[in-house]
Image: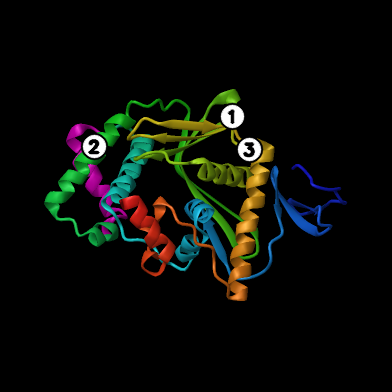
């Protein structure tokens, strides 16, 4: 990593290397090595399970992310249900082969029964409305089938790392490809617009580097719905910068919880779907502006 000061001696403990970095503020931070990544020491405290989604949410509004960690989620929406079902269909295609037209409806119903029944119940969809949902997923699937799948290795690949006691970093990669000399490519499918996928792709790059011991050759976000595509070539410096940011998020969470403080609230378009909207004046004002 790019060191802000001098490096002290390093020692090896099992499969991890522990070093010390001296910051410009003359404080010593213990670093634990995971493959090519050094993860800074974080203060002890409550358990933190940081997913890619929660990390992204924290980057835009810490209070909304803290709500997720308390188990406060927004209601299921038709769009999110369609996106979830489409992702399951894409994974089914990648692992089991193309789904023919005659069997598509049955395949969708199997995927719903295999883990989406509660979401379906919360939506309150009638059987007649479910037909329209499956038709929309079918349209996304037709676009998905036009994409190249050469080098496919795995779908919905779970990554999990425990960089510190009580801290778990977790994510699921929609698809992993082997691009030969170019290295491993991680792909995140989107069914709507791409938005800003940068923080999520950076988090996946970090997880892959820490768990697999190598920096991925490329990370990519692809919108099946709009055809948009963006990709990045991760670097050692970039992955290390993400590790520092994630460590700061964990530190801020634990420190705020311990001290009984409050998290910053940042208003934006995301306030429309925030489950904390009723108690957030900033979010209500933002919703008024963006809905006008």
Are the two marked residues, 2 and 1, in contact with CB atoms closer than 8 angstroms?
A: no
Inspect the magenta stretch and tell me whether residue 138 lies in it.
no
**SS class of the residue under badge 3?**
loop
Q: Which residues are magenta?
A: 99-117
- Is 155 left or right of 90, judged from the image as shown? right
**SS class of the residue under badge 1?**
loop
User: Which residue occupies 23% across, 32% down?
Assistant: 100
Q: How many marks?
A: 3
In this view, the residue in front, 61 or 162, is: 61
Task: Tell me the residue that label 1 is attached to.
Answer: 183
Name the dominant secondary structure of the magenta segment: helix
Which x, y percent locates residue 99? 26, 34
The residue at the far left in this view is: 128
Which x, y percent locates residue 114? 30, 53
Task: Tell me the residue that label 2 is attached to.
Answer: 138
In this view, the residue in front, 226 or 109, is: 226
Inspect the magenta stretch and tell me whether residue 115 lies in it.
yes
Task: Tell me the distance, in whole angstroms, between the alpha carbons under discs 2 and 1.
Answer: 32 Å
Badge number at residue 215 = 3
């Amino acid at each position: 990593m790019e060191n802000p000061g001098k490096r002290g001696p390093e020692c090896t403990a099992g499969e991890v290397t522990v070093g010390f970095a001296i910051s410009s503020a003359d404080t010593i931070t213990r670093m634990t090595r995971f493959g090519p990544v050094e993860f800074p020491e974080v203060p002890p405290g409550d358990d933190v399970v940081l997913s890619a989604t929660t990390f992204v949410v924290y980057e835009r509004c810490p209070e909304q992310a803290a709500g997720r960690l308390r188990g406060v989620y927004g209601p299921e929406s038709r769009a999110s249900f369609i996106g979830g079902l489409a992702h399951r269909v894409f994974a089914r295609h990648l692992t089991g082969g193309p789904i023919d037209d005659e069997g598509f409806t049955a395949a969708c119903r199997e995927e719903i029964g295999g883990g989406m029944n509660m979401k379906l119940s919360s939506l309150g969809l009638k059987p007649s409305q479910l037909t329209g949902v499956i038709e929309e997923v079918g349209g996304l699937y037709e676009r998905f089938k036009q994409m190249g799948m050469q080098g496919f290795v795995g779908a919905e690949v779970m990554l999990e790392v425990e960089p510190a006691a009580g801290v778990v970093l977790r994510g699921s990669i929609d698809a992993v490809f082997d691009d030969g000399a170019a290295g491993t490519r991680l792909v995140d499918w989107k069914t709507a617009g791409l938005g800003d996928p940068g923080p999520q792709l950076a988090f996946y790059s970090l997880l892959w580097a820490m768990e697999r011991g190598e920096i991925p050759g490329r990370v990519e976000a692809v919108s099946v719905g709009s055809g948009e595509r963006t990709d990045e070539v991760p670097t050692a410096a970039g992955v290390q910068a993400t590790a520092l940011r994630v460590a700061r998020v964990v530190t801020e969470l634990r420190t705020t919880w311990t001290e009984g403080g409050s998290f910053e609230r940042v208003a934006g378009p995301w306030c429309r779907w925030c489950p904390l909207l009723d108690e957030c004046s900033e979010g209500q004002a933002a919703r008024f502006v963006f809905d006008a």
